[in-house]
Structure formats: structure tokens, C-alpha cells
Image (cartoon, helix red, strand yellow):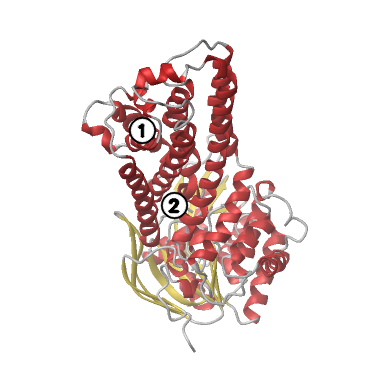
Amino acid sequence: MTAVGLLSASAVLYANQLRRLARARRTWVALVLAALPVAAAAVIVQFAHRYEGPPPAMSIGWVLQVQVVVPILALILGSSVVSEEVDDRTLTFLFTRPIPRPALLWGRWLASATVLSVVLAVSTGATLWILRAGLADHAPTPEQLAALEGEDTRLGAGVAGPLMAAVLIGGLTYSALFAAVGTLFRHTMILGLGYTFAIEGFVANLPGKSQTLTIQHHLRSFVAGYGSPLWRELDAFQNAVFGPGPEALLTLATVLAVALLGGSWVLARRQYVLPS
Amino acid sequence: MTAVLEARDLGRWYGQVVGLNDLTATIGPGITGLLGPNGAGKSTFLKLIAGELRPSSGRLEVLGHEPFANRELYRRVGFAPQQDALYDDLTGLEFVTLLVRLHGYGAREARDRARRALGRAGLDTAMDRRCAGYSKGMRQRTRLAQAIACDPELVVADEPLTGLDPVGRREVLELFRELAEGGVHLIVSSHVLHEVEALTEEILLLHRGRLLAQGSVGEIRDLLDHHPRRVELEAREPRALARALLAFDEVAGVTLAPGHPDAAGGRLIVETRDVQAFQRHLTATAAELRAGVRSLESTDASLEAVFDYLVR
């Protein structure tokens, strides 16, 4: 029996972590949070009037889903990837096996990312479906939209797809970032909450270039670049500076890759002193 | 004799705190006991052996390899850590199976190995229950099971008898002996001398991060026999008893101290080089003098005190 490779060790840890997450309390908390946009959509369709400009799916999808639910769910599921093993002092068992240490990050992060993606996709899909079905009669006509934008903009086109993609890409990027932070620091949840509200919540909405340092900025640029021009009309984007869509996508992919590779590098070298 | 472990000037610090200091030792095949009071550096030494920590100074070779982050060595060493940590949401069988799978075994083979190891550790009937419901002793046995499940050449167990009842201790000691008879080397730590004594003749004594002594239990005992023990007793006639006791060769000194406020008489603190001879003489003398001895207590029989003596 030789030492176990990265892929096979990651696969074993992935399968195990997926099973554990299915019954973990943090998954149930994530499900409750993910239900918030769905509930908000259900309430809105009850009191909807005819609207002009960007459809409510954009506002709810962005403000509630991308700005709040995505980072917090990613924090709940991503921060525990490594730090849970350190806090629970079970890391010893994994670190004294003949496996490459980064397998711990890859296997467990992939499991968290799978659960996160499924939960976010279902939540976003349900939110969009409720809004589409409930507000069909209240939507502006294509002529109204064309007048607003000065071009032919079909309602629905460039909204659901980019929003779903932004939610999933955002979830993966945030969770990889929080997982990587967990390789360096304890109390990742507190750090992550601070980052989510102070940097992603505040700096991302400041006028000027500082917002380009946030993931929110790149997600905004992504939906504005690949989606309907109506995205730029959102109130939530009032102070936004937009970059090109492909560049935003590349930046987000780079952040994700750097987080995972950096976390792997730390895990492979760092000593974790666990109290007996 | 091929050394299982060789440490040269091995040191490990936690910031300003010394965990292990300039330890030089060679451990041979079979069972070796690592003995020392809490805080002696036993766990640090074992974590270095198991490759969980990297030495701050010096050199350590286990089965011919430097242990830290050494996957080849992890395949040959089983480590049962001291910390009471398991995946509480998994059953004992699921937990051990997962760890065995990380040695490269397929699902079925891993499950069989986990089942056998848990059975050997005495968890036949409990392995399908969640670890969260395990007693302290069962958790200890689960940690041992995962350490032996992949047939390691060396088992490193940190305080493996803690939390076990007397029957459990006997069973685990028996398991260790079986493993040793099968050619497995064991390094077992404890802060209780008789536990280690029941297992092996070869011991290393650690204290405050330093190696005090290495050798057979007999050699260490000889060393300890020169240690004057302190015995405290309460008597109705402490002065008369003190005068009489000073006449015996094994009594190195007697100190009078105030007794319990509610009791007549006083307290004597006796330093003796031979506790058994002292107790024989005390019985006879106390009866002869009608000294009214109410209590008798050895106050420094603990290992900590013995180590304090050895480092003076």
C-alpha cells in the first residue's frame, strides 16, 4: 500500500463530508436563511402593482440574495471546512494519515460547495419562479422598457440566467475564501462576519475605486456585463463602477483559485498546535 | 538491535514556553513507557514522534524517517492522541472506517478492518452507535482502534488508560501486550508509575520538558528509593511520639505542626527514607506510648513529588 493520492483522498473526504453535512445543524441554518428570499418573493407578489424599470426579481435577487444570503451561507458552510477540524481537535486524525494535507481542504470544500450550490440554486430558482408567475400581469410592456432604455429589451432575458450564475459564482468564491481563511485563523466565523459586513457590505457600496477590491463589485460587473442593461438601473447599483463582464469573471475565478491554492499551501506546511 | 526512535538534542517550544528541551534518547523495539507528571512534555514528545509537530531544534528519526508531514511514515505509525475528540455525529465504525480509507483501502476492506480493530479494542457491541453517546472509556478505545486498524509497525498512545475503569485498563493492557507479541512496537505515555510498570520494563522519565532518566523500572526504582518521603500524622501526644521516632535510623527528621483546631494533640511531619520500616516502628511505638495516632498520610507519594526530588 503506497501513500494515497490527492484525488482519491479528496474523494473519500468529499463523500464523508457530504454525508455529514446532510445532517449537520449548519446545513439546516443555511436552509432557513436560503428560504428568506423565497418568502420575500411570496409576500411581494401579494401586494404587487404595475412596475416600471428593473423587475423586482433583480432587486430581490441582488439585495437579498447576492448581497446577504450568498456571503452568509458561504460563511456558514465555507468557514468550517478546516477550522472545524482545528476547533474540534480532530485534525490530528487526518494529519497523521498518509494523504497529502491539501486533500482535507479540497475534499471538504468541494462537499461544502456542493451543498451551498444546491441550496442557493433552489432558493434562487424558487424566488425567480414565484416572482415570474406572480408578477406576469404587472410587468411593463416592451414599449415601456424600450422607452426607458432606448433599446429593445425583452423582460426576463438577461435577468434569471446572470442572476443564477452570479449567485453560484459568488457562493463558490466566498466559500473558497472563507475556507482558506480557516487555514490561517481560528474563529473564522467572527472574521468572516466582519469581512462580510465591513468590506463586502460597506466598501462595496462606497463611491470610487475602493469598491473594486470587493467580490460584490466583480459580481455586479459580471451581471451588468453579461445580463440585461436593466441591471445598471438598479437602485442598489447607484454608486457602482462597472468593469467588463469577462474581466469580472476572470477576477472571480482568480480569487477562487488563489484562495484554494493558498489554503493548500498553508495546510501543507503549517503546524496546528491542538490542546490535549 | 535496530532503534525504533532516535532523538538528538530534540527541542520544541510554544512561543516562550518550553515543551521539550534538549532531549536525547534512543528507543528500541517492544513496549516503552513514557512517564512524567502533567506538563512534563510527554504529549509534545509523542506529537513530534507522530509527525503532528515539527521540532524547534535537534533531530528526530522514527523508523528511520523524519516524521513531520512524512506520508511514508504515517503509513507505518498509528497514533492515539490524548485529546478527547472524535467525529461525534458518526458512529464508531463510520469514524474508524473513514480513517482506514485514508490509508488507501477500499470501502469494504476498510470497513472490515475498522470492525476488527473496534472489536479488539472492546467495542463490539457499541461500534454502530454514534460517538456522541460514548462514555469516556469508549471514546478512549475508539481512539486506540483507529491507531491499530491499519496494522502499524509502531503504535504511539498518549495516556491511553485515562478514563478507563479497572476492567477496561486490564483489557487495554492485554491488547498492548498482544500487539507487542505480534511484533508491534509501542510507545505509551502515562503519569501513573504502576500503569507503565504493568506494561513494560523500559521507561523514559520526563519532567518539565527534560529527560530525567531512561532505563528499566528497577533502575528507576533504585533511584527513587533514595528519595526521603514525607508522612504526616495526627496524634494526641505528638511531642513524645516525635522524640521516640527520631531514634529510628530511617527517620531523617520530624517537624511539629499545629493540629486540627477541634482535636486535642498536634500534627507531626516526618521525613523517612524507608516508609515501610517507618510504619512498622510507628505502630509499635504509638501503642507503647499510647500516643493516640488518629490519621496517617503520605503527602508526597505523587509522581510529581518524586520528579521534583529527582530534579533537585
Location of residue B180 by image quarter: bottom right
Tell me the chain of label 2: B
The label number, if any, that marks residue B88 in the structure image = none
x 48%, y 74%: residue: B73
Relative to the observer, which residue lies in front, B80 or A269? Answer: A269
Q: Secondary structure at mark 2?
A: strand
Q: Amino acid at mark 1?
A: Ala
User: Height in image: B6 above or below A21?
Assistant: below
User: Height in image: B142 above or below A211?
Assistant: below
x 43%, y 25%: residue: A63
- The residue that label 2 is drawn on is B255
Residue A228 visible? The answer is yes
Location of residue A177 by image quarter: top left
Q: Residue B118: give x, y in percent of width and height.
A: 70, 63
Seen in the image, is A92 located left or right of residue B7? Answer: right
Q: Amino acid at mark 2?
A: Thr
Q: Residue B294: give x, y in percent of width and height.
A: 62, 47
Calculate the distance from the C-alpha at mark 1 to the C-alpha at mark 2: 89 Å
- The residue that label 1 is drawn on is A224
Quarter containing the N terminus of chain A: bottom right
